[in-house]
Image (tube, grey):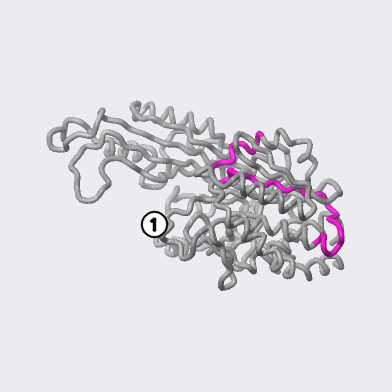
């Protein structure tokens, strides 16, 4: 443990000295949904990594600037994934401080991207600095991939991995530090993610909006028609009504059920914590299993008709909604899209379903031998044995590495439950940066046999 003790002793100093580098990255408004700031952000990170001694470059893949950097020696090494793009800041008036004027206050780094994901992948950069400062070299091969379009689907990442396979292959596994933990003070290792299929559903009932008195009871409202269609897609019991929707769902293994049983989770407390009237999903499936092992169909937003001030008595001629389907292993987005199109053709042939992108699901078995290295590193960094979470309810591009390189993928949230991902007043606790940095450093030393 001599090397670990020495490196661990430098972590706080390295983090404190590197905060301005992190704040500089946070000042760049790299909002992928708006297509701005991405080139500047990628160039900033490339230059910073090169100054640190990494071999770093930026590659444009279909307009997506991805930073690829490598340092250290000793195979097989590992891949660290993060993303330098961020979410839009809306609603901006809800921010207590300007979203792209980051600051450190009350032990938290505040600003858009602080937690999702710049602050978390900077832990990897700080960890390498701590090892290099202490040992004079990085005794394990590290490849860092910083995506520029994660927040809008990472559609170009598989192409990038295919093109850069000679530089990426051979890694033992891929690790992503992203997201908040579920419970205060309980670190996690997440072994999988659900996929996502993004869609837009549109209904038209006339060429133009019409007077609700002159045409009421003659021409149907597109808004009513859309509501009826949505009711045919999912029932009041929370079960999706699309035939075949639950086909190909892989149930939890016995080991995964054991891990679920170890996760402290009170469904009623969770319901009350967000002010929900009730919980959703098939009621005959336990809540955590619904969250990790069942697909979902969600209405993300609805638009149609008059939404201004006052009142306007019209029959909307068009209404639409955005949908997402969270996919589980082994469901495929193209097969799910066909199921939805076929069902809509039966119940609403006039409806138009538009594909807007997807993520593939991914799941790493809990008994993979690499898992113990990750679990031990998290315990060293956070001071507590982490929970094993079989699958996240959300989505990350894990499958790009799992399928493209044939390696296991582990996700370790370095953030806390209150970091406000995608919301105003996003923040990351400075203590989490220290713990995340220590975790990455411990993992690299363990893989190098310098533990």
Query: Residue 208 in the image: x percent, y percent?
Result: 24, 31
From the viewer's perspective, is residue 83 above or below residue 400?
below
Q: Quadrant of the C terminus?
A: bottom right
Seen as rendered, the residue at the extreme left is: 214
Whether residue 286 can be seen here? yes
User: Quadrant location of residue 127?
Assistant: bottom right
Whether residue 258 can be seen here? no
Q: Which residues are magenta?
A: 131-159
Whether the magenta-drawn stretch holds residue 325 is answered as no
Whether the magenta-drawn stretch holds residue 157 is answered as yes
Q: Which residue is mark 1?
A: 278
Dot 1 falls on a residue whose secondary structure is: loop
From the viewer's perspective, is residue 414 above or below residue 325?
below
User: Quadrant location of residue 302?
Assistant: top left
From the viewer's perspective, is residue 11 above or below residue 66?
below
From the viewer's perspective, is residue 306 above or below residue 138?
above
Q: Residue at x 53, y 31 (%)?
A: 334
Between 243 and 343, the one nearer to me in the picture: 343
Left or right for 442, reference 224: right
Left or right for 225, reference 214: right
Disc 1 crowd, CA 10 A, few/some/many (<14, 14-19, 20+) = few
Q: Residue at x 25, y 37 (%)?
A: 316
Query: Residue 189 in the image: x percent, y percent?
Result: 66, 56
Q: Quadrant of the N terminus?
A: bottom right
Q: Residue at x 50, y 33 (%)?
A: 336
């Amino acid at each position: 443990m001599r090397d670990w003790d020495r490196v661990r002793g430098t972590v706080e100093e390295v983090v404190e000295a590197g905060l301005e580098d992190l704040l500089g990255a946070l000042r760049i408004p790299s909002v992928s949904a708006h297509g701005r700031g991405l080139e500047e952000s990628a160039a900033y990170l490339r230059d910073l990594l090169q100054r640190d001694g990494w071999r770093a470059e930026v590659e444009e893949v279909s307009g997506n600037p991805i930073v690829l950097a490598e340092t250290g020696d000793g195979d097989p090494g590992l891949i660290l994934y993060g993303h330098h793009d961020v979410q839009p800041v809306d609603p901006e008036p809800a921010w207590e401080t300007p979203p792209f004027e980051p600051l450190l206050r009350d032990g938290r780094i505040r600003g858009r991207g602080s937690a999702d994901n710049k602050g978390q992948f900077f832990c990897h950069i700080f960890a390498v600095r701590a090892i290099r400062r202490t040992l004079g070299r990085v005794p394990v091969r590290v490849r860092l991939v910083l995506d520029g379009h994660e927040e809008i689907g990472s559609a170009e990442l598989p192409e990038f991995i295919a093109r850069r396979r000679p530089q990426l292959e051979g890694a033992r596994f891929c690790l992503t530090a992203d997201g908040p933990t579920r419970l205060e003070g309980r670190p996690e290792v997440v072994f999988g993610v659900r996929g996502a299929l993004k869609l837009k559903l549109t209904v038209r009932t006339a060429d133009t909006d019409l007077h609700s008195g002159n045409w009421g009871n003659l021409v149907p409202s597109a808004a009513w028609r859309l509501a009826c269609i949505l009711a045919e897609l999912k029932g009041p019991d929370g079960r999706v009504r699309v035939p075949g929707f639950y086909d190909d769902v892989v149930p939890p293994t016995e080991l995964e059920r054991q891990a679920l049983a170890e996760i402290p989770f009170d469904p009623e407390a969770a319901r009350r914590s967000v002010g929900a009237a009730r919980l959703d999903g098939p009621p005959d499936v336990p809540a955590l299993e619904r969250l990790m092992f069942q697909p979902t169909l969600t209405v993300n937003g609805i638009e149609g008709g008059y939404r201004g001030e006052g009142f306007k008595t019209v029959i909307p001629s068009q209404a639409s909604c955005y949908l997402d389907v969270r996919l589980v292993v082994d469901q495929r987005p193209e097969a799910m899209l066909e199921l939805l199109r076929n069902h809509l053709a039966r119940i609403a042939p006039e409806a138009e379903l538009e594909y807007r992108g997807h993520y593939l699901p991914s799941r790493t078995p809990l008994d993979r031998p690499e898992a113990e290295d990750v679990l031990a590193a998290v315990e060293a960094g956070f001071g507590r044995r982490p929970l094993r979470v079989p699958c996240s309810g959300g989505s990350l591009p894990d499958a790009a590495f799992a399928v493209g390189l044939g390696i296991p993928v582990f996700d370790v949230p370095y953030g806390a439950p209150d970091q406000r991902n995608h919301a105003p007043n996003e923040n990351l606790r400075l203590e989490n940066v220290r713990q995340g940095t220590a975790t990455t450093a411990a993992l690299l030393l363990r893989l190098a046999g310098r533990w």
